[in-house]
Amino acid sequence: MRHLKGALHVTVGHRAAGSYPRHIYCTPPFNLANISQDRDDPAVYMMTMSSSPGILDGDDLDVRIVAEYGSRLMLKNQGYQRVFNMQRGARQKMELRLHEQSEISYIQQPVVPHKNSSLYARNTVHLEDGCIFTLGEIITCGRKLCGEVFRFRRLHSVTELWHRDRLILKDNILLEPALVDVQGIGQAEGYSHQATLVHVNTRSGDVAAAKELAESVLDAEDGLACGISQPLPFLLVVRALANGGEQLYDAFRKIEALLWKLNEPAAAPSCDRAATPLQAIQQG
């Protein structure tokens, strides 16, 4: 039976002209494309690609990303991540390491678990002082238009954030529709899609402005239930429920764009002291 033990290892460096991909190592099914467009932008923009239609039975995928001192990376993936029918299950491990004064932003496109699929995904993030990190994860109910609503066997996603070797957040999502009614009371309560966005800023030590920007986007969305928590002064967690993956993805991309602009390393144009973070960005 076909299965892959794929690896994607990326190191982003920094020099006077800006950030650049210093080291890339890929094995099937992975590949990576540099999609940076503006030569005057010191950040680097990259897209992960796959030659596989999705995650198949027995796959064991390993992603490692390092942002060196002063580097800035916005990462995207190619499309919806399909998880196919399985007997044994599949695993995906992603490890990100941010050195001082670096930034990574990665809003992942929705995961679509097919009937009888089983996936264990583990994300581990190590941050030093002076870092900014944004991660978005969206989980769908499956192939909704094909009648596969929560027909997958198991989906287990664990995200750990470490700051200077101290655990600051552990997010543990376990969905087993055959054992627990995912749409019942205390769960999704009628919604079919769920999403989590995590934003950490150990550079300023404060996410008050980020919270205001996230609220400005989420308040404008119809048919979306959401909440924002702040476990630490420099840590923000957004939870959202909806009935479509595209709505969640678009909302998270809007938040990402505002945070990316907010955290630009270059000095921002002066603005009125009374202006809100959103007004300051619009004025810039």
Image (spheres, rainbow, N blue to C red):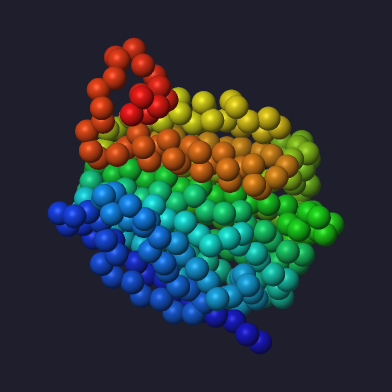
Residue 15's x, y, as percent? 17, 57
Quarter of the view holding residue 121: bottom right
Q: Position of residue 39 (x, y in %)?
A: 28, 54
> Quarter holding the C terminus?
top left
Q: Nearer the viewer, residue 103 or 279?
A: 279
Q: Residue at x 29, y 19 (%)?
A: 271
| Left or right position of 129 against 62 | left
Q: Is residue 125 visible?
A: no
Q: Please tell me which residue is depicted at 57% across the width and 30% down the height of the picture.
A: 218
Relative horizontal placement of residue 110, taking residue 271 as reference (left or right)? right
- Residue at 61% in and 37% down: 240
Write the residue at 36% across / 37% down. 261
Q: Is residue 83 left or right of residue 136?
A: right
Please state which of residues 246 and 209 is positioned toward the viewer in this rendering. 246
Q: Position of residue 7 (x, y in %)?
A: 44, 74
Image coords of residue 136 (percent x, y): 51, 47
Image quarter where the N terminus lies is bottom right
